[in-house]
Image (cartoon, rainbow, N blue to C red):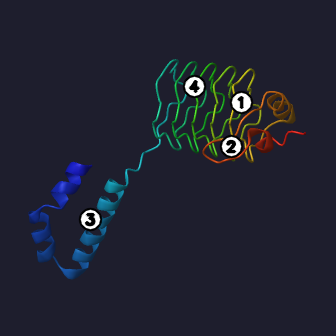
Amino acid sequence: MKEIIAIIMSRRSVLFASSIKPVRRFWFTLVLTLLVVVGLSGTVAATNYNGQSLAGADFSGQDLTSSSFVRSDLRRANFSNANLSGVSLNGALLENANLEGANLSYATLDGAVFDRSNLTNAVLEGAFAFGTQFRSAIISGADFTDVFMQGDNEKELCEIYQGTNPTTGNETRDTLYCDS
């Protein structure tokens, strides 16, 4: 993308722009501006990983915003410090996955299996987690603010909660609405 922007911004392109009619020059300038803004913004395109076997894959630190992992095998995958905001993990198998410090805000986790996964300091704010399994998951410092989940999951997580999320400052106990 940077190469395309460099070519567009070259001296010949600028000279060409000055030789075209005013109306077309306006559109040329508008398109050029949009290409530069989009190219420099570092926007990441969502990727479709649906149904793939990605057991043990390393996605640590990656920006996977709005990507889709529907029914994917993600056992032992490393998503530590990854941006998974808005991802779809419907029915995904994440047993023993590392999601430490991951941003799962507004993700769709319906039917996903997080058994024995590490969710230490993860942010799940606004996630949809109905039918999601968290058996024996590590949730120290995880933020479950406004997560939609079944009551039995909430009770199970309230038995093992601890810590405060370092990113949001919210206590895990409070975000799960655990009784005193």
Q: Residues within 10 Å of mark 2 (few under 14, many from 20)?
A: many
Q: Residues within 10 Å of mark 4 (few under 14, many from 20)?
A: many
Q: Is residue 142 left or right of residue 39?
A: right
Mark closer to the chain start, 3 or 1: 3
Determine which of the numbered discs, if any, sits on residue 2 in the image: none
Mark closer to the chain start, 4 or 1: 4
- Residue tagged 1: 111
Q: Residue placed at 20% from the left, 49% from the top?
A: 3
Q: CA distance from mark 4 to mark 3?
A: 41 Å
Spot occupied by residue 139 in the image (x, y as percentages of width and height): 70, 30
Mark closer to the chain start, 3 or 2: 3
Q: CA distance from mark 3 to mark 1?
A: 44 Å
Q: In this view of the protein, which residue sits in the foreground, 9 or 125?
A: 125
Q: Secondary structure at mark 2?
A: loop
- Residue tagged 4: 98
Q: Secondary structure at mark 1?
A: loop
Q: Is residue 50 left or right of residue 163?
A: left
Mark 4 or 2, closer to the camera: 4
Marks 3/1 in contact by CB < 8 Å: the verdict is no
Spot occupied by residue 127 in the image (x, y as percentages of width and height): 68, 43
